[in-house]
Image: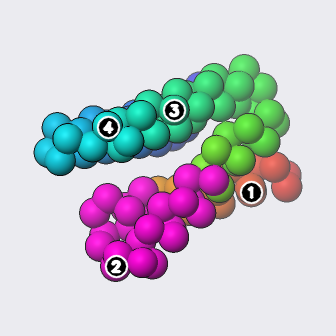
C-alpha cells in the first residue's frame, strides 16, 4: 500500500522551500525543505513497504511541527509557517493513530 499522503506532504514541504528560495532568496529555506522533504519521502517509502513502520515518519512530522509551530507562534503569519504546522499536525495525528493501532 503506497503512502500517498506521506509523499504529497514531502512534496509540499520541498515545494514550499523552493518557493521561499525563489521569492526571498532564502538558501536556508531551500536547504531545510530539501532535508525535510527527502526525510519525509524516505519515511513514506518505509510506510509503503510496511504500513506499521511509521516511527521515522512520525518523528520527521513531529520535528517539523515543533519548528514551524514555533515560527508560527512568533510571527502569527499563516504562510508558510502556519500552513506547514497544520499539515505537520495532520501527519502527526495520522502516523500517531497508525502507531497506536
Q: Nearer the viewer, mark 1 or mark 3?
A: 3
Please provide percent x and percent y for residue 20: 25, 45
Q: Secondary structure at mark 4?
A: helix
Q: Residues within 10 Å of mark 1 (few under 14, many from 20)?
A: few
**Horizontal arrangement in the rendering, residue 9 relative to residue 44 (left or right):** left
- Residue identified by numbered label 3: 35
Q: Nearer the viewer, mark 1 or mark 2?
A: 2
Please provide percent x and percent y for residue 9: 46, 42
Q: Earlier in the sequence, mark 4 or mark 1?
A: 4
* Image point (38%, 42%), residue name: 28
* Image point (81%, 49%), residue name: 99
Q: Nearer the viewer, mark 4 or mark 1?
A: 4
Give the numbered dot on residue 97.
Answer: 1
Q: Earlier in the sequence, mark 2 or mark 4?
A: 4
Q: Secondary structure at mark 1?
A: helix
- Residue identified by numbered label 2: 76
Amino acid at each position: 500500500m503506497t503512502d500517498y499522503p506521506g509523499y504529497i506532504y514531502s512534496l509540499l514541504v520541498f515545494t514550499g522551500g523552493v518557493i521561499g528560495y525563489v521569492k526571498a532568496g532564502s538558501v536556508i529555506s531551500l536547504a531545510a525543505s530539501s532535508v525535510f522533504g527527502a526525510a519525509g519521502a524516505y519515511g513514506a517509502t518505509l510506510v509503503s513497504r510496511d504500513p506499521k513502520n511509521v516511527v521515522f515518519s512520525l518523528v520527521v512530522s513531529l520535528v517539523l511541527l515543533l519548528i514551524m509551530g514555533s515560527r508560527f507562534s512568533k510571527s502569527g503569519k499563516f504562510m508558510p509557517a502556519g500552513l506547514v504546522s497544520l499539515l505537520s499536525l495532520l501527519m502527526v495525528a495520522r502516523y500517531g493513530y497508525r502507531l497506536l493501532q
